[in-house]
Structures are given as C-alpha cells and as structure tokens.
Amino acid sequence: MNYDLELLFPRLHGVQYEITSPAAPDYNCIAWAAGDTSRWWEPDPFEIYYWPKDVPRLPTLESYSQTFQTLGFDVCEDPDFDLKWEKVAIFTGSDGIPTHAARQLSDGTWTSKLGQLEDIKHPNLSNVSGRAYGEVTLILRRPKVG
C-alpha cells in the first residue's frame, strides 16, 4: 500500500493495486499508454514535448484519439477484456480536456503512469477516475500482435 497514492487517488484504497516501476519524470501517462518510456507526450503549442507530426497540437479528445490512431488504434465501445485486442482508455475532466490515459494489460487489468509518479497496475479504470483525472471518455483498441 502506498498511502500517498491513495490520498491522490482515493478509489485505490482497499483495492489490489501494485506499483510496477518507480517515479520517473521522463515520460507521462500518454507515452506509457503508447508504450514509450523515453519521452513525455503532450500536444503543447511550443513543440517542447513529443506529439505525432500530423496530429493537431490541441488539448482535445479528438487530438488524443488521432494520436492513438497513428499507432493503429481505433475507437471502440467498451473497455471489456478481449484476448484479441489491446485497449487504451482516455480520461477527461469536467471541461472535456484529456487528463490521463491507461493501457489494458494481457491479463485484463490496467496500467497507469501517474504523472511524474509511479506506474501502477490496477484492476479497473474506476480505480484512477475521480477528482484527479475525471472519467473515462474514450476507449480505443488495436489487434494484439503475437
């Protein structure tokens, strides 16, 4: 248990979650969901951070959707586990601006990079939803390889 994480994400309290890597400022949740631990992904207008070349550098759900589509993901309806698909969830705040991304693991659980904090494995998406990240607004999937 990490009580600091549970203060930030109260829905982790009492849940079987696991810290899977130490805190790291090199990458964020968008990069982590995309499988990249070498750089921070963000659609900043000054091009300080990585963002796919042909995707608008705007903090919109459409821009985030297009970003994952460049990686072979397509929009889907549900986060339910399916052996054939790798899934990503995009969270937005009440203002509709994307705040977080999580990736589904091969056992059906989810993994999240919590800002500059740790990466965690958690049972479901609601474990990190709420005050800090808002709610899941978009699910994307791509065929699993191998």
Image (tube, grey):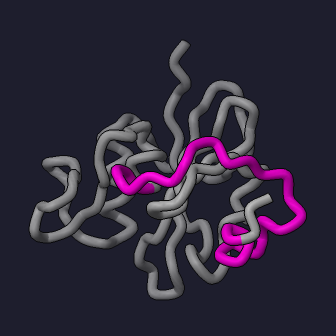
Judge by depth and name the residue closer to the eye, 141 or 34: 34
Name the spot of residue 81 as percent of width and height, x first.
73, 39
The total of numbered circles placed on residues is 0
Magenta-drawn segment: 4-28
Left or right: residue 145 versus residue 61 is right
Find the residue positioned furthest to the top. 146
**Quarter of the image where the N terminus is located:** bottom right
Name the spot of residue 84 as percent of width and height, x first.
64, 25
For image coordinates 56% across by 74% down, the residue present is 133
Name the spot of residue 106 as percent of width and height, x first.
68, 30
**Quarter of the image where the C terminus is located:** top right
For image coordinates 50% across by 34% down, the residue present is 142
Residue 26 belongs to the span the image colors magenta: yes
Residue 46 sits above or below residue 134 on the image = above
Left or right: residue 77 versus residue 27 is right
Name the spot of residue 101 as percent of width and height, x first.
50, 57
* Residue 89 seen anywhere in this rendered image of the structure: no
Find the residue positioned furthest to the right. 14
Residue 57 sits above or below residue 51 on the image = below
Left or right: residue 45 versus residue 85 is left
Left or right: residue 16 versus residue 117 is right
* Residue 61 seen anywhere in this rendered image of the structure: yes
Residue 136 sits above or below residue 49 on the image = below
Residue 85 belongs to the span the image colors magenta: no
Find the residue positioned furthest to the left. 46
Judge by depth and name the residue closer to the eye, 77 or 120: 120
- Quadrant for residue 4, please give it: bottom right
- Quadrant for residue 60, please give it: bottom left
